[in-house]
């Protein structure tokens, strides 16, 4: 039997990758996920699948922002991910780049405004996936943790900074499916299941694309 196509879920530690993986499972009770564990808990590159799910999910360990990890361990993880993507990019029909809305300020500030020579990890990651021909969506997770005003402020900051860096990020609702110049984003809450149906529909669209 041929392996199912793979969905990539990638992002820094603790952003909610495992929580999202669980939401995509038709039978979450049977999914022995790692969601809710300590940051840095998903280290092995493993795929998860269920009989009723037409694809498998690869929930990659997060690079960066691992409070407990040493610099060497972080570099090791980063190298592992790079090698994995370079070797397996053709298996992935779609990728979710998950970011934590509460970290946007920090990341942009630290890596972009104060020192323009270093670029934010998520921008670097987006570039890297695109260089490897994996279509992506940016999932801005944990929106339940912010007020509407702060949510809009943080998302605008992210989009503006990305633009300055050379990335054209647009809301999924305004995104044209085959426009490769744009990168769609969706605000999300794994806790409240905000936009879960929209995400599932988008994943299905990309799955259909490779099957037709
Ligand atoms: N409030 C809120 N909490 C969330 C949301 N998504 C995830 N969390 C919580 O954030 C924590 C981390 O979630 P995980 O899914 O384990 O994060 P991860 O990205 O898989 O983390 P690593 O495996 O360490 O890379 C858990 O305590 C989750 O319950 C969300 O949308 N809102
Ligand atoms: Mg995890």
Image: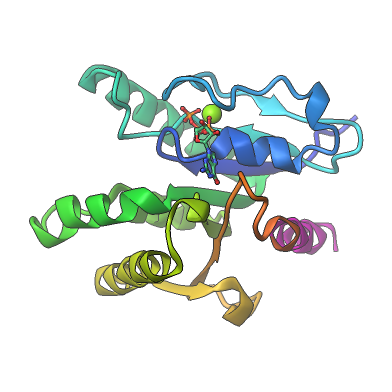
Residue at point 57%, 56% (across, down): 188
Q: Is residue 118 above or below residue 83?
A: below
For the C terminus, give its image quadrant: bottom right
Tell whether 143 sits left or right of 33.
left
Rendered residue at 30%/47% (across/down): 121
For residue 69, side relative to residue 198 (left or right): left
Q: Which residues are magenta?
A: 199-212
- Which x, y percent locates residue 178? 64, 76
Q: Position of residue 56 (x, y in %)?
A: 75, 36
Residue 34 seen by the camera: yes
Which of 58/106 is in front? 106
Seen from the viewer's position, the closer of residues 71 and 26 is 26
Picture coordinates of residue 92, whole percent (x, y): 65, 46
Question: Is the stretch drawn in magenta largely helix, strand or loop?
Answer: helix
Q: Residue at x 57, y 42 (%)?
A: 9
Relative to 174, say whether 6 is above or below: above
Give the percent coordinates (x, y) of residue 155. 39, 67
Decide if residue 34 is on the left or right side of residue 65.
right
Does residue 91 appear anywhere in the picture? no
- Residue at 39%, 71% in the rendered image: 149
Q: Residue furthest left?
A: 114
Which residue is the extreme one toward the front? 147
Q: How many marks?
A: 0
Image quarter of residue 4? top right
In magenta segment, residue 210? yes
The answer to which of 193 and 181 lies nearer the viewer is 193
Colour logic? rainbow
**The N terminus appears in which quarter of the rendering?**
top right
Q: Is residue 47 magenta?
A: no
138 left or right, relative to 66: right
């Amino acid at each position: 039997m041929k392996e199912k196509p793979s969905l990539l879920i990638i992002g820094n530690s603790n952003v909610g990758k495992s929580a999202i993986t669980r939401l995509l499972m038709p039978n979450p009770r049977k999914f022995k996920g790692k969601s809710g564990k300590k940051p840095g808990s998903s280290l092995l590159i493993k795929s998860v699948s269920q009989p009723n799910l037409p694809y498998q999910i690869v929930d990659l360990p997060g690079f960066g922002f691992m409070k407990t990890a040493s610099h060497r361990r972080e570099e090791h993880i980063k190298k592992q991910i790079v090698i994995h993507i370079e070797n397996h990019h053709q298996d992935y029909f779609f990728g979710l780049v998950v970011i934590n809305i509460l970290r946007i300020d920090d990341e942009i500030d630290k890596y972009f405004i104060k020192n323009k020579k270093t670029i934010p990890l998520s921008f670097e990651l987006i570039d890297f996936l695109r260089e490897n021909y994996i279509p992506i969506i940016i999932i801005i997770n944990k929106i339940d943790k912010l007020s509407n005003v702060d949510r809009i402020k943080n998302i605008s900051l992210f989009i503006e900074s990305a633009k300055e860096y050379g990335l054209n990020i647009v809301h999924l609702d305004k995104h044209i499916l085959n426009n490769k110049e744009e990168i769609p984003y969706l605000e999300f809450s794994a806790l409240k299941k905000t936009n879960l149906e929209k995400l599932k529909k988008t994943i299905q669209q990309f799955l259909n694309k490779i099957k037709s």
